[in-house]
Image (tube, helix red, strand yellow):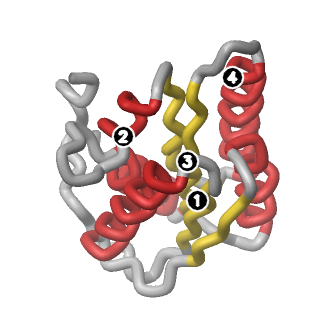
Amino acid sequence: MSSEGSPDATPIDCHEMRVAVVAACWHEKVMDGLLAGAGRALDDFKVEAPSIVRVPGSFELPVVASALAEKGYEAIVALGVVIRGGTPHFDYVCRAATDGLTRVGLDTGAAIGFGLLTCDNEEQALDRAGLQGSSEDKGYDATSAALHTASTLRRIRRGYEIDG
């Protein structure tokens, strides 16, 4: 299981943080699970008014994440799924989305939660979607990572000592 060795993701209070979730629409059942997981994390971290934005597919995640960062969102959770097919399209979409989301974080300083599933088949995607019977909850994990990172960035920007 790939979550072995994962960091402690104990929820922290993020009630004052501006948070957005940008989610693709492809693969509805998987996306429903990812969004539900993100919602559970937002509740656990006490995020009061997150913005939820839908985009057609994973390729569109970076441009919308960039626009959200420009509007002052501190944490942006990008959720999507790309399932390998018989053409190189999988590689192009995965690379574009990954590189684009990385660039958004580096260019804007916003914390980006990387919840893009890149799977060989639908079974792998469902197993990571946080649905009943799934072994992982990547929507929750990506949201937790974004919120912890945004909290760390906030402390750095305010000049607080960073401990670990």
Q: How many marks overall?
A: 4
Measured in 3D between alpha carbons, the distance from the residue under mark 3 to the one under mark 2, in whole angstroms, is: 10 Å
Q: Earlier in the sequence, mark 1 or mark 2?
A: 1
The answer to whether residue 36 is above or below residue 58 is below
Which SS class for mark 2? helix
Q: Earlier in the sequence, mark 1 or mark 4?
A: 1
Instruction: Identify the disc placed on residue 32.
Output: none
Residue 53 makes an appearance in the image: yes
Measured in 3D between alpha carbons, the distance from the residue under mark 1 to the one under mark 2, in whole angstroms, is: 23 Å
Return the x and y of residue 162 as percentages of the image width and height.
36, 48
Q: Earlier in the sequence, mark 4 or mark 2?
A: 4
Q: Earlier in the sequence, mark 3 or mark 4?
A: 3
User: Which residue occupies 76% across, 30% down?
Assistant: 96
- Name the foreground residue: 142 vs 32: 32
| Residue 122 occupies quadrant | top left
Instruction: Identify the disc placed on residue 90.
Output: 4
Pointer 3 residue:
27
The amino acid sitting under disc 2 is Leu
Q: Earlier in the sequence, mark 1 or mark 3?
A: 3
Measured in 3D between alpha carbons, the distance from the residue under mark 3 to the one under mark 4, in whole angstroms, is: 14 Å
Which SS class for mark 4? helix
- Name the foreground residue: 67 vs 88: 88
- Name the foreground residue: 45 vs 115: 115
The amino acid sitting under disc 1 is Ile
User: Which residue occupies 49% across, 25% down?
Assistant: 119
State the quadrant of the C terminus. top left
Which SS class for mark 3? loop
Instruction: Identify the disc placed on residue 126.
Output: 2
